[in-house]
Amino acid sequence: MSAPAARAAPGFTLVELLVGLSLLALISLLLFGGLRFGLRTWEAGGTRLAQTNEIEAAQGLLRRELAEARPVTVGPPEQEPPVFFQGGGEALLFVAPLPAHRGVGGDHVFSLAAEGDRGNAQLMLRWHPFRADALAQTLFDPKDSSPLLTGVDAIAITYFGRPAEDAPPRWLGRWDGALGLPELVRIQVRFPPGDRRRWPDFIVAPRLWTAPT
C-alpha cells in the first residue's frame, strides 16, 4: 500500500500578499512623514533659537556701549560746548570705549543706523578712534563695523531728557547734546511682515549721565 500523499504547505494568497504590502507601504509612509515633521520642527526650533540669541547679542552689545557713553565736549571751553552726542530718529552717533576684546583701547566714535532697503536692511554698528580735531570726518573703515542684525525693516530711536534747562523731561525724537547726554535711550527695531522675530523692549541709561547745573 502506497504512502499517503504529503499535505501542501500553508502559504499566502496573492490577495493577502497585496494587502500586506499595502499596509507595509502605508506604515512606512506614516513613519517617514513623522520623521520629516520632526526634522522640520527641530530645524525651526533651532532657527528661532539662533535668531533669539542674535537679538540678545545685539542688545547686549548696544547696552554695554550706550551705558558707557562718554560726555566728551567739542568746542572752545569758554563757550560751554555741547557733548558730542548726535541722536536722530533712525541714526545715532556717540562716544564710548571700544570693547577690550577688539584689542584697541581708548574712546571711539560709534555710529548706529539701519543701512539698506526697508525689509532687507542691516542694523549696522560702525566705529573709529575718537579725535576731537577730526569729528567732521564721518568716514568709517569698512573693517571697523559689525552688522548686528540683517533683514530689518526699520529702526526708531528716541531719547528721554530735558529739551531745555527749565523744561520737564520727556521722550524726544532727536538729541543734540546741548544739555549733555540723555537720561535714557530707547531703540526699537521693526521686522518685515511675516518675520517672526521679536525685538524686546530696549531702554538703557548712560551711567555717566549727569543732570545739567
Image (spheres, rainbow, N blue to C red):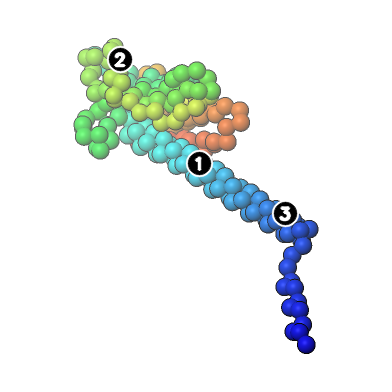
Viewer-nearest residue: 197 or 137: 197
Q: Amino acid at mark 1?
A: Thr
The residue shown at (54%, 23%) is 119
The residue shown at (24%, 23%) is 129
Viewer-nearest residue: 182 or 23: 23
Q: Nearer the viewer, mark 1 or mark 3?
A: 3
Where 45 sits versus 95, above or below? Answer: below
Where 145 sits versus 8, above or below? Answer: above
Earlier sequence position, callout 3 versus callout 2:
3
Numbered disc 2: secondary structure: loop
* Residue 57 rendering spot, x and y as whole percentages: 41, 39
The residue shown at (55%, 48%) is 39
Q: Quadrant of residue 106?
A: top left
**Which residue is the site of mark 2?**
139
Q: Nearer the viewer, mark 3 or mark 2?
A: 3
Q: Amino acid at mark 2?
A: Leu
Q: Are marks 1 and 3 in contact (CB under 8 Å)?
A: no
**Image quarter (top left, top right, bottom left or bottom right) of the C terminus:** top left
Q: Which mark is residue 22?
A: 3
Q: Quadrant of residue 81?
A: top left
Numbered disc 3: secondary structure: helix
Does residue 138 appear left or right of residue 157 in this picture?
A: left
**Image quarter (top left, top right, bottom left or bottom right) of the N terminus:** bottom right
**Which residue is the site of mark 1?**
47
Q: Amino acid at mark 3?
A: Ser
Earlier sequence position, callout 1 versus callout 2:
1
Residue 176 visible in the shown view: yes
* Residue 168 rendering spot, x and y as whole percentages: 49, 26
